[in-house]
Image (cartoon, rainbow, N blue to C red):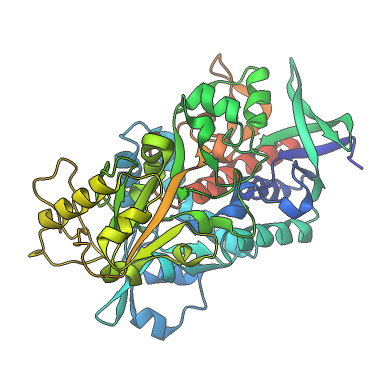
Amino acid sequence: MLPETVDVVVIGAGNAAMCAALAAREHGASVLVLERAPEAERGGNTRFTAGAIRCVYDGVDDLKALMPDLTNEEIANTDFGTYTAEKFHDDMGRVTEYRANPDLVELLVDRSRPTLRWMRAKGVRFAPIWGRQAFKVDGRFKFWGGLTVEAWGGGPGLVEALFAAAAREGIAVAYEARAVSLVAGDDGVTGVRVRQGGRTREVRAKSVVIAAGGFEANSEMRTRYLGPGWDLAKVRGSRFNTGDGIRMALDVGAMPYGNWSGCHAVGWDRNAPEFGDLAVGDGFQKHSYPFSIMLNANGERFVDEGADFRNYTYAKYGRVILNQPNQFAWQIFDRKTRHLLRDEYRIRQVTKVQADTLEDLVRKLDDVDPVRALRTILAYNAAVRTDIPFDPNVKDGRCTEGLLVPKSNWANTIDEPPFEAYAVTCGITFTFGGLKVDGEGRVIDTEGQPIPGLFAAGELVGGLFYFNYPGGTGLMSGAVFGKIAGTGAGRRAAGTG
């Protein structure tokens, strides 16, 4: 049964929501988490991620504080490098074309390290991303792209750790409990209307935190805000992120904010299901494209696959693929780069063809003009600067010359069989538009004032991401702003904030 009254209600049950619940509980608040999904599907989009978390670290000592089980041998065999606050700021500015709200970025960057240490104290474990973010060169691993840390067990492991912490701390979770609207008046937000088991009732609260994700699973909202064709995108994650949290906040006067026409969207298996599959998780993504060339239905290249590390391009290339004829592309590799392919290329549910000649390969590419495809591959091969050494750990400058669509790094000729190709379409992860919040996680109204009692965190915080996204920033921002919002909600409930 839902309680009639509680100190803090948290709407949502992913990483941001659970961090908010844990932070509110630290201030003595009684906390109720409303999870729209059944228990078997709990955890929101967090459950579908690979668990990468972008954070500031100045050296191995910072990493050991998060991962104390790192061995001396592992440290000796690895170049972890550093990821400074300055570099994090630079990456956020560069990939968002300097539109990201600087105050939000400063909070994200400055609190990334202490927030992960706080999560570690709550029982969340972390590990280096050996398999996806480090290549072995001359017998030593080298991390690249500013992304070194992941949650132990990926997204599912993170969800389990956060729920275990919530259970230890006496936080109540209601499943199949859909928040439908906020209870609000002259004194601000004082509760939530919840539909559970076919009945709707009110839960009164001193503070409410909305952390219910974006509108990526709502095809009508995608088309309205992102534009024509977005109803055709696959949804990478939860089927429950339909924009309810954003809508109910707007209904009580919240300020819409951020890049409402933008989203995080990636290359995703062409034949993946409409929504995320928990059994496969993140496995439908196909992120080794910097070592490939991508061909559309016309048999033509359409994007610089090697423009930057995949961490800084993958979240915008889904949109590029969606804009191609019939909304798909093929990624093509040869023997030279097969060993660099990420694990997701080896799952059973993969759309793949293989051949020993390029002529045979292009004939196997479904829905592609084979004559143009072969012509494109041969022209690309002739344009590769093979005199420049190939190095997957750095932007190596191994490029093409004379092509209308260049490849700036990691250009290898495609001429050694066996040849492999993987079909991808657009998979949307989350939407960038949402609500305006201040530095305490309070939701701001259209008059520019905080709405008393209302806080927000996670995907529905607008103003952080525009056009693009540095890999691993979603979980980090969810945790940072979840903790901020939960702290504010808990203090308000306790009468100290």
In the image, farthest residue toward the right: 1
Image quadrant assignment for residue 163: bottom right
**Which residue shows up at 58% across the image and 57% down it?**
281
Q: Nearer the viewer, residue 46 or 392?
A: 392
Q: Nearer the viewer, residue 231 or 462?
A: 231
**Which residue shows up at 46% across the image and 63% down it?**
149
Query: Up-down: is 275 above or below 257?
Result: below
In the image, farthest residue toward the bottom: 73
Q: Is residue 296 left or right of residue 442?
A: left
Query: Up-down: is 346 above or below 285?
Result: below
Quadrant location of the N terminus in the rendered image: top right
Q: Is residue 55 left or right of residue 180?
A: left
Count of marks placed on residues: 0
Q: Nearer the viewer, residue 119 or 193?
A: 193
Quadrant location of the C terminus in the rendered image: top right
- Where residue 339 appears, as percent x and y from the top left, is 34, 72
Is residue 440 among the parts visible in the rendering? no
- Where residue 232 appears, as percent x and y from the top left, is 52, 34
Is residue 375 among the parts visible in the rendering? yes
**Which residue shows up at 80% across the image and 33% down it?**
205
**Which residue shows up at 38% across the image and 71% down it?**
60
Q: Is residue 148 left or right of residue 114?
A: left
- Where residue 117 appears, as percent x and y from the top left, is 54, 61
